[in-house]
Amino acid sequence: MEKPIKFILSVLCSMAFPLAAQAVSGGKQVIIDKGSQTLRAYDNGKLVMQSRISTGKEGKATPSGHFRAGEKSRMHYSKLYHNAPMPYSVNFGGNYFIHGFSSVPHHPASHGCVRLPIGAASKFYQWVAPGTPITITG
């Protein structure tokens, strides 16, 4: 009787805490939760960084899904938005970046990118490697 209960509990926990379940695999991994406006970085399942973020506002939503960190640039300039500076940029597909910004409210406010406070962006930029899995939910 104990095994079915453990199985049911493990299924319920994986449904209730999908982000925690995703973060147990080895290596580096980034989980971005648009619902809580939070970025979490894991190394071998251990939380190494957590920061508030601001994702895309209505009409400019940040895409959900599974991505990989792409090209990194200490200072990227937006090709879409008047050459706007985007310090500590990490591309994760197309014209979407995780980057530092001076204004990071606790709600979606960007044009689709993931904004981090400048200090957190610098730390993230130094930590993340091209190819690091990035999961965006919410």
Image (tube, grey):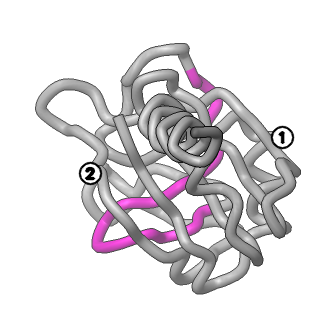
For the C terminus, the image quarter is: top left
Lower sequence index among marks 2 and 1: 2
Residue 103: % across, % down: 58, 23
Q: Is residue 110 left or right of residue 135?
A: left
Q: Nearer the viewer, residue 82 or 75?
A: 75
Q: Is disc 1 placed on a helix, strand or loop? A: helix
Magenta-highlighted stretch: main secondary structure? strand
Residue 64: % across, % down: 29, 51
Q: Quadrant of residue 27?
A: bottom right
Q: Residue 27's mark?
A: none
Q: Residue 119's mark?
A: 1
Amino acid type at mark 2: Pro
Specify start and end residues of the magenta stretch as a single range: 89-104
Q: Residues within 10 Å of mark 2 (few under 14, many from 20)?
A: some
Q: Nearer the viewer, residue 12 or 74?
A: 12
Q: State the CA–CA distance, disc 2 to disc 1.
A: 24 Å
Q: Is residue 118 magenta?
A: no
Q: Is disc 2 placed on a helix, strand or loop? A: loop
Disc 2 vs disc 1: which is toward the camera? 2
Residue beneath the point at 19% across and 38% down: 60
Q: Quadrant of residue 105?
A: top right
Q: Is residue 109 left or right of residue 18?
A: left
Amino acid type at mark 1: Gly
The residue carrying mark 2 is 63
In the image, residue 135 sits, relative to residue 92, either above or below, namely above
